[in-house]
Image (cartoon, helix red, strand yellow):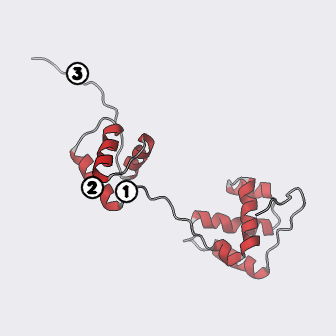
Amino acid sequence: MGLKPYFLAVDYQLSEQDYQKLRQLQKNTKLSRRRYRKVTVLVMLHQGFSVSMVQAALGLDDNTVRRYWDGYQDKGIDTYLADHYVPYTGKLIEEQEEGLAGHLDENLYLDVKPIIAYVKERYGVLYSESGMRDLLHRIGFTYKQTKAVPVRFP
């Protein structure tokens, strides 16, 4: 895909059929946030909003807004709307996460490093410290800072 000269005025007009299809999709309450933004970018541009207004309204950068328009122009409405995005689900499968959660329920760890070693040994999967913290939060674990508790001697 070559660079397009955006200093020239671009006519962001959709066909009436595409516009109606996009407006209908906007009303779909089950539309993912990502697809809703892709649809709304085209609708707003068609309605005469500037790229800077669209980016401010939707929290996107100007390159993304232009890339969405170019994607529509290059691929057509149906291919543009086909969302092949697959979200990241982690390195462990669900059963492994459940096994790790069961292990953590029975064993107390003060740091993520031994948990990383356990997962590497048990499942053959290596995590970074931040990745392990994210995994632990995702499966419902939180870190509690340990502190000294005074004990009374008899």
Quadrant assignment for the N terminus: bottom right
Question: Disc 1 vs disc 3: Cβ atoms closer than 8 Å?
Answer: no
User: Mark 2: which amino acid?
Assistant: Gly
Task: Please report the residue visible at 73 percent of the width from the left and 59 percent of the height from the top.
Answer: 65
Judging by the rendered image, the residue that carries numbered circle 2 is 99
Q: Residue furthest left?
A: 154
Under tag 3, what secondary structure? loop
Q: Residues within 10 Å of mark 2 (few under 14, many from 20)?
A: few
Task: Tell me the quarter of the picture where residue 11 sits.
Answer: bottom right
Q: Which of 73 and 22 is in front in this view?
A: 73
Left/right placement of residue 109 relative to residue 137 reads: left
Q: Nearer the viewer, residue 1 or 57?
A: 1
Label placed on residue 150? 3
Left/right placement of residue 145 relative to residue 131 reads: left
Task: Please report the residue visible at 76 percent of the width from the left and 66 percent of the height from the top.
Answer: 70
| Of labels 1 and 2, the one closer to you | 1
Task: Please report the residue visible at 81 percent of the width from the left and 59 percent of the height from the top.
Answer: 3
| Of labels 3 and 2, the one closer to you | 2
Left/right placement of residue 77 relative to residue 92 reads: right
Judge whether 132 appears above or below 29 on screen: above
- Compute the Cα span from label 1 to label 2: 10 Å
Task: Tell me the quarter of the picture where residue 90 sits.
Answer: bottom left
Please state the horizontal and vertical placement of residue 50, each as a whole percent of the image. 82, 59
Judging by the rendered image, the residue that carries numbered circle 1 is 92
Q: Residues within 10 Å of mark 1 (few under 14, many from 20)?
A: some
- Compute the Cα span from label 1 to label 3: 40 Å
Q: Which residue lies furthest to the bottom in this view?
A: 17
| Of labels 1 and 3, the one closer to you | 1
Under tag 2, what secondary structure? helix
User: Mark 3: which amino acid?
Assistant: Pro
Q: Residues within 10 Å of mark 3 (few under 14, many from 20)?
A: few
Please state the horizontal and vertical placement of residue 83, each as a whole percent of the image. 59, 70
